[in-house]
Image (cartoon, helix red, strand yellow):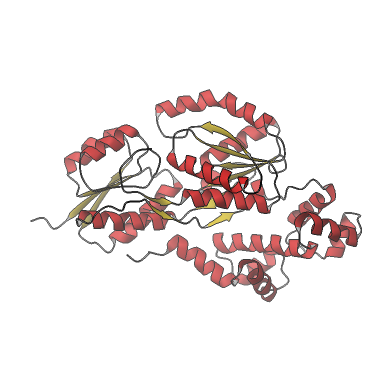
Amino acid sequence: MDPSRRIALLLDRSLSFVRGVLQGIRAYAARRPQWVIRDGPPRLHMVNRVRDWKPHGIIAGLVLPQVAHTLMRMRKPLVDTAFALPGLNVPTVDVDHAAVGRMAADYYLERKFARFAFYGSESACYSRVEERAFQERLAESGHGVSCCYSDFLPDAKASALWRKSAQKTVRWLRQLPKPVAVFACEDTPVRYLADLCRQLGLQIPDDVALLGVGNDELECRLTTPWLSSIEVPSQHIGFEAALLLDRLMAGQPAPSQPILLQPLRVVTRHSTDITAVEDETVQAALQYIRQHMGEPMRVADLARALAVGRRDLERRFRRLLNRSVLEEIHKARTETAANLLGDTHLPISAVARQAGFTSARQLDVVFARFKGMTPTAFRRQARAHRDAEPMG
């Protein structure tokens, strides 16, 4: 009897999220030396090869209906990591897209935006869930959301829809009241919006703030300005998908609900690096803080640079932002430090210096006040989410 377990992976490795999922699957497979893994794209031409190989289990990103239904007819243990197609009775492991939508809404509300928009897929389940959660959280604060849809699924039909939707998207962007906070269901469509904004002469983030999902480094840094994004636990998703498949192959029942993991954080880049207030003095102060982040900065220096009285500036900040000017400076520096801690291997002292703190000790104190933990603990947690192998 052959002791090996043949595992087929049908995942689009061109996507950063999927590469993280693959790493998580490989981490789990390291504990299962009997697993023999083959992978390929989730396309119809691969399905016959998978069938001929006679796998014991399959993990797939089910985005094309024909691929999904053909795999389901094979009656092998199957786990989906895409959550794109409605009505599939397939065990699923993914990020909690409702939590993603709420995180996006809270992020923009904290930046004092009053106008909101959503750009998503007409057909993908995850997009609809994000949209609904985004709308519901904003409705609690009395805000509505303007929505526009396109499609980004990888097939010829979707490509045609992209061309067809371009004019609609341009009209929508032009008609949105400014400034507006736009949340897009993925990083790819938010980069598309950034390119359109540039063509239309719309300033990012001053006219249109843009936030995506996935924190795909290539997508987020491929355009100007760099794009903010919600980071998701892709490696953890892959690990949990492999663990679930292992249980299904052992004859355990499928879970009644999808296994959904919490999003990690918002990675702030230039596309949302703004607080939307109508007061021109406060807006100028916020812009000054962003532009001089790494320099020594006292409240008196800021007031002098803006030719405004310090007391008047403090009063405006308290009224509009409910915090002092110094608190805003510390908050902005903390966010910069958090991004450096999560995305680089710089020593804590260098992080403090680049974020504008006078010392690593000051960074410790201020960071703990805003984040509830030390910079070292924050970095450890970020790496654990990204790199650790969850225990099954």
247 left or right, relative to 357: left
Quarter location, residue 328: bottom right
Toward the left, the furthest residue is 1
**Quarter of the figure that contains the C terminus:** bottom left
Residue 108: x, y in percent? Answer: 64, 49
Residue at 68% x, 33% y is 176
* Residue 279 in view: yes
Q: Do we see residue 215 in this rendering?
A: no
Q: Point out residue 350 in the picture as x, y percentages from the top left corner.
A: 64, 68
Residue 46: percent from left, percent from top = 27, 37
The picture places residue 5, in percent across and down from the top left corner, at 19, 54
Q: Is residue 349 left or right of residue 11?
A: right
Viewer-proximal residue, 191 or 295? 191
Residue at x-position 30% and y-position 37%: 68
- Among the 4 quarters of the image, the one containing residue 370: bottom right
Q: Quadrant of the N terminus?
A: bottom left
Q: Nearer the viewer, residue 315 or 347?
A: 315
Can you tell which quarter of the image residue 326 is in?
bottom right
Q: Is residue 157 above or below residue 20?
A: above
Q: Residue at x 28, y 59 (%)?
A: 29
Work out whether 256 lies above or below 183. Answer: below
Tally of numbered tags = 0
